[in-house]
């Protein structure tokens, strides 16, 4: 228990430290991106004869530095103040009251009471995917969102395990950290997309009084691409151990490792919420890996998470349902399973007189 507590407190402290570094990293990447944009601008537009593109870029960059800093600070402020609303807008989630869904509300409320946690808000995304996520940066904002598909496919115990997982993310400070990471990746990716979509549409200045520079354009694009890559790497560098700790925290809250295991197995392969940005998917209970599998995954695989619960939390793998018997058949002869479903002759009891 002492080791577990030490690991949890260490994780929480590290999250606070990482948050500070991520905010500092946002400003550095914004500076780098701004420099690349100015360099590209002078490369296309040109500079007066007798001056260099690099010299003019540095001069304008230092003049604009205070305004760039204020813009980055405003972006962080907006991200902190409006993150829940922005995420709700892109996911289409709707708030849930006690009256609208008393059972779900009571599940979350009981979990909060058991650990003295502030009750977060509840929301539902109308989607067939099986997933959930938490958002917000403080007690007034924290929101646990689940999909309608998850509520339909999981049992009450399994839903409770998922809610406990998201509550643990809130308690551990993971949600705040992910919001900051999404803010960083969002602003840099937005600029990067604009640049690369419009690359080649603008021509280098041919004005006799000014000279453009193809080399400056290439360097500027490279600087922006590096910023974009670093923003993605920052997001992906967040330790995947947060998911293991959240799974363990959910078991601590519910005292039911089997429910967490069965929830993970049901959600596996059915977690992708169509139309939701990758940054939001990174915050979800499960983020199905893409074609690169685990290489760039923000979550450990379901197999590894289940294995950890079996080995460390005393969980048990659920018994697999028996497969229906295979019988030889003619194309025009229905299977036993089909006949049984229709109440046909295969559904009649055996061993007695008819």
Image (spheres, helix red, strand yellow):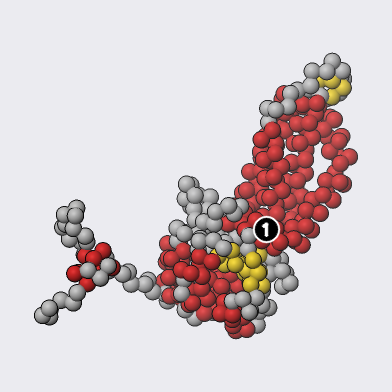
Q: Which sits in the foreground, 154 or 111?
A: 154
Going 46% across and 74% down the picture, which residue do you hit?
Answer: 155
Location of the N terminus by quadrant is bottom right
Q: In terms of image quadrants, where is residue 95? A: bottom right
The furthest residue to the right: 63
Res. 258 image quadrant: bottom left
Q: Which residue is mark 1?
A: 89
Image coords of residue 319 (percent x, y): 33, 72
The quarter holding residue 6 reads bottom right
Q: Position of residue 307 (x, y in %)?
A: 42, 66
In this view of the protein, can residue 245 be seen by the observer?
no
Please state if 274 lies on the left or on the right of 18 as rendered. left
Q: Position of residue 87 (x, y in %)?
A: 66, 59
Is 59 displayed left or right of 96 in the figure? right
- Tell me the quarter of the image containing the C terminus: bottom left
Residue for point 54% across, 57% down: 273
Can residue 280 be seen at all in this image of the molecule?
A: yes
Q: Secondary structure at mark 1?
A: helix
């Amino acid at each position: 228990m002492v080791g577990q507590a030490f690991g949890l407190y260490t994780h929480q402290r590290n999250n606070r430290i990482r948050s500070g570094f991520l905010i500092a990293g946002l400003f550095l990447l914004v500076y780098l991106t701004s420099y690349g944009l100015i360099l590209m601008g002078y490369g296309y537009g040109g500079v007066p004869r007798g001056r260099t593109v690099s010299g003019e870029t540095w001069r304008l960059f230092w003049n604009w530095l205070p305004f760039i800093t204020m813009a980055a600070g405003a972006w962080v402020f907006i991200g902190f103040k409006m993150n829940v609303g922005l995420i709700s807008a892109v996911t289409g989630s709707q708030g849930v009251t006690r009256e609208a869904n008393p059972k779900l509300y009571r599940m979350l409320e009981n979990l909060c009471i058991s650990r003295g946690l502030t009750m977060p808000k509840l929301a539902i995304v109308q989607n067939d995917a099986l997933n959930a996520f938490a958002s917000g940066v403080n007690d007034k904002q924290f929101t646990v969102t689940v999909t309608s598909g998850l509520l339909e496919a999981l049992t009450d115990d399994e839903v409770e395990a998922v809610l406990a997982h998201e509550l643990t993310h809130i308690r551990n400070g993971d949600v705040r950290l992910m919001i900051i990471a999404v803010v960083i990746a969002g602003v840099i990716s937005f600029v990067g997309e604009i640049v690369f979509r419009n690359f080649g549409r603008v021509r280098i200045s041919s004005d006799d009084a000014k000279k453009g520079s193809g080399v400056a354009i290439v360097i500027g694009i490279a600087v922006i691409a590096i910023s974009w890559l670093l923003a993605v790497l920052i997001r992906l560098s967040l330790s995947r151990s947060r998911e293991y700790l959240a799974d363990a925290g959910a078991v601590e809250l519910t005292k039911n490792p089997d429910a967490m295991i069965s929830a993970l197995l049901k959600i596996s392969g059915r977690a992708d919420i169509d139309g939701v940005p990758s940054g939001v998917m990174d915050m979800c209970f499960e983020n199905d890996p893409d074609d690169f599998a685990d290489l760039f995954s923000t979550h450990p695989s379901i197999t590894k998470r289940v294995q950890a619960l079996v080995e460390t939390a005393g969980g048990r793998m659920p018994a697999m349902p028996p497969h229906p018997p295979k019988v030889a058949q003619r194309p025009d002869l229905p299977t036993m399973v089909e006949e049984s479903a229709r109440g046909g002759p295969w559904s009649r009891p055996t061993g007695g007189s008819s």
